[in-house]
Image (tube, rainbow, N blue to C red):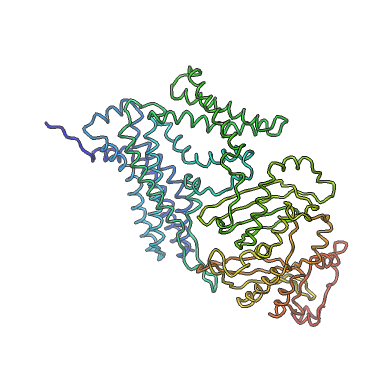
């Protein structure tokens, strides 16, 4: 009888479904209990959930439960359907069948797909029936759950299959899969700690979008969510929308790509590699050096931090020694796993030396700044905006775009870069306890460039001196000039209310509130709700005060004692709280800005009076007045009589209370 080969085998598919039925049965049962069964029990109870509650429940299952289930179930399915690759007898048997390798791969891969696609469809149908019966049918969120969870599982399953092609050991597969899922973040974090002492201004909290994408479980949790929209009139829940659909699409497409790459690797995979830790020749080289360098960056630096960081031996040389030693051990362990032997010391010497050389060359290159990282200051024409944080004796932060403010940021940045070689020596020579106006300053810069990239720098322990304020080119004077800039000062004081636009979108004021203490017999904190027109008048006055410099001035160096600061602050800062609600663009979601009020803000105070918000009962109160008020009220642990009675204040109280007064 003539023998034929096939590209798909229905019998093998059927056997996979029956043989690994416990896997998909447990998966289906878990989702059944969590969704239709639990939902049906709630809907049949005395207090059934409303439609919004059901939508929230389904959204929670998608965004919180979905990623971890997809991650774990994906590797479990891949281990099951491709388990024959890890035994010499089983792989020889399967490869002797009259089925092409493409047929074997396609049949087994589709078997795994069916293990989550079919249960998801059935669960979708059952849950839809339950919600229809309970009059809480939400097809949009049900469809979002079906497609979202399936997209996640497609990615993780395909990635696990891809990992399965590079190992001949069943137990190594989940290890490789788990490590590769978080490897990008771990390497970035470890490498950042490694180069931070060498690269001046380097900050590991930089723009790491690529690292986020290469850490899928974190990216899914960070980007995929169900957002509730609120009605702008009564703030009731209006609609829910799924955020992160493009992320799900990208990972689903990536899953298809990984499946194609896995097929290509399977076509080249040798049957004799069953039982090997790494089954592909070129991947063995990557495995050796990858294990060694990863161990040096993670375990090596961890050893240094635990043993030497707080000792007299701390320093860059000891850190490098720890990394080199651990890297050599890592290379030795990797070689043992590949060779399945302990007699690999001589064979590992060259690889260990190469790893040590790589570590030293990277450290030397960072120290010499061969890439020009430490000295880079972007040109004004390249900058779209820059977010600045300055923390000396005072703290401020703002996002500026104006040419004048941006030039002041660049001048400060250039001064920091130019003096980077003298900062360490100056820190050792300056005495910060002599009362001469010396302090340390922290500066964080985040440039958003016009080409869409982000450049971030972070500088800590910058020595600044009050005496240098007279020198316009000094670091202290440049920092003070920036915080005194009109745009910077306004945005630092008002945040999103500094202008009528934010990120190119119109800022719409929707209202707010003003808290005060009723100046009557009963002194209690109360709240006055602001209308949108009142908020607009107040914000216009706030911008006028900020532009005129009547908001609190931030001092980079402040020689006042803490007692003097508190005393002067208490005389000018009011305890009244001003909150302004706003919307950005077409969004119906409301943001809130909190504004501190000061005695110098004459335009804002006048606007509060003109709006009728401030009157004989609704008054401003400084912190000093507030503290003195309560000190006089409570003596010897007993409350005294009321401290302030405004004319007619008793009219605000119930009749019985007025009579007793």
* Residue sitting nearer the eye, 381 or 521: 381
Q: Is residue 282 left or right of residue 615?
A: left
- Front position in the image: 280 or 390: 390
Residue 654 spot, x, y in % from top left? 74, 79
Residue 235, quarter of the rendered image: bottom right
Q: Nearer the viewer, residue 328 or 22?
A: 328
Q: Position of residue 205 (x, y in %)?
A: 59, 47
Where 233 sits versus 392, above or below? below
Position of 479 compared to 7: left or right? right
The residue sitting at 61% across, 78% down in the picture is: 533
Image vertical order of residue 418 relative to residue 621, above or below: above
Give the camera-side residue of 21 and 100.
100
Q: Quadrant of residue 657?
A: bottom right
Q: Quadrant of the C terminus?
A: bottom right
Q: Residue furthest left?
A: 1
Instruction: Give the position of the N terminus as an image quadrant.
Output: top left
Q: Please name the residue shown 58% across and 26% down the image.
A: 325
Q: Position of residue 161 (x, y in %)?
A: 37, 39
Q: How many marks can you see?
A: 0
Q: From what the image shows, is residue 619 above or below residue 121?
A: below
Q: In the image, residue 617 lies at what x, y percent?
A: 76, 78
* Left-right relation of 384 to 28: right
């Amino acid at each position: 009888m003539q023998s034929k080969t096939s590209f798909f085998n229905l019998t093998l598919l059927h056997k996979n479904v029956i043989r690994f039925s416990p896997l998909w049965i447990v998966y289906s049962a878990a989702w059944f209990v969590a969704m239709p069964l639990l939902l049906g029990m709630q809907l049949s109870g005395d207090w059934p959930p409303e439609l919004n509650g059901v939508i929230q429940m389904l959204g929670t299952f998608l965004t919180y439960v979905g990623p971890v289930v997809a991650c774990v179930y994906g590797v479990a399915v891949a281990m099951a359907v491709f388990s024959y690759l890890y035994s010499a007898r089983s792989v020889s048997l399967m490869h002797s069948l009259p089925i092409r390798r493409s047929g074997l791969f396609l049949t087994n891969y589709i078997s795994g797909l069916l293990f989550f696609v079919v249960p998801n469809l059935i669960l979708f149908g059952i849950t839809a029936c339950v919600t229809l019966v309970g009059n809480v049918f939400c097809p949009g969120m049900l469809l979002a759950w079906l497609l979202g969870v399936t997209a996640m599982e497609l990615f993780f399953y395909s990635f696990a299959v891809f990992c399965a092609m590079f190992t001949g050991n069943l137990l190594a597969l989940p290890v490789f899969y788990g490590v590769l899922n978080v490897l990008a973040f771990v390497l970035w974090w470890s490498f950042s700690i490694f180069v931070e002492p060498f690269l001046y201004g380097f900050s590991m909290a930089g723009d790491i979008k690529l690292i986020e994408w290469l850490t899928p479980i974190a990216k899914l949790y960070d980007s995929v969510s169900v957002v509730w929209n609120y009605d702008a009139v009564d703030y009731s829940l209006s609609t829910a929308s799924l955020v992160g659909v493009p992320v799900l699409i990208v990972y689903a497409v990536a899953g298809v790509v990984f499946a194609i790459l896995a097929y290509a690797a399977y076509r080249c995979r040798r049957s004799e590699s069953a039982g090997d830790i790494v089954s592909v020749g070129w991947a063995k080289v990557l495995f050796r050096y990858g294990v060694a360098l990863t161990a040096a960056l993670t375990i090596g630096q961890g050893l240094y931090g635990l043993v030497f960081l707080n000792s007299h031996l701390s320093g860059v040389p000891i850190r490098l020694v720890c990394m080199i030693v651990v890297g050599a051990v890592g290379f030795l362990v990797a070689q043992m796993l590949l060779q399945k032997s302990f007699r690999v010391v001589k064979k590992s010497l060259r690889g260990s030396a190469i790893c040590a050389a790589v570590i030293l060359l990277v450290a030397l290159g960072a120290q010499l700044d061969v890439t020009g990282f430490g000295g880079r200051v972007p040109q004004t024409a390249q900058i779209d905006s820059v977010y600045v944080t300055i923390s000396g004796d005072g703290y401020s932060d703002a996002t500026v775009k104006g040419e004048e403010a941006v030039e002041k940021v660049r001048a400060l940045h250039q001064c920091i870069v130019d003096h980077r070689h003298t900062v360490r020596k100056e820190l050792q020579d300056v005495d910060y306890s002599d009362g001469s106006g010396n302090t340390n300053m922290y500066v964080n810069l985040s440039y958003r460039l016009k080409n869409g990239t982000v450049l971030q720098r972070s500088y800590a322990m910058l020595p600044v001196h009050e005496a240098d304020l007279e020198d316009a080119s000094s670091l202290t004077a440049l920092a003070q000039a920036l915080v005194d800039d009109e745009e910077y000062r306004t945005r630092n004081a008002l945040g999103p209310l500094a202008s009528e636009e934010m990120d190119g979108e119109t800022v719409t004021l929707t209202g707010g509130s003003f808290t005060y203490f009723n100046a009557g017999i009963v002194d209690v904190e109360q709240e006055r709700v602001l209308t949108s027109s009142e908020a607009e008048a107040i914000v216009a006055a706030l911008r006028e005060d900020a532009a005129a410099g009547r908001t609190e001035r931030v001092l980079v160096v402040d020689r006042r004692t803490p007692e003097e600061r508190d005393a002067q602050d208490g005389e000018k800062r009011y305890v009244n709280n001003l909150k302004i609600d706003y919307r950005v663009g077409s969004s119906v979601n409301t943001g809130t800005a909190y504004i501190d009020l000061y005695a110098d803000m004459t335009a804002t105070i006048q606007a509060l009076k003109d709006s009728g918000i401030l009157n004989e009962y609704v008054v401003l109160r400084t912190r000093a007045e507030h503290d003195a008020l309560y000190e006089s009220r409570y003596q010897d642990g007993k409350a005294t009589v009321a401290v302030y009675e405004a004319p007619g204040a008793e009219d605000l109280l119930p009749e019985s209370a007025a009579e007793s007064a």
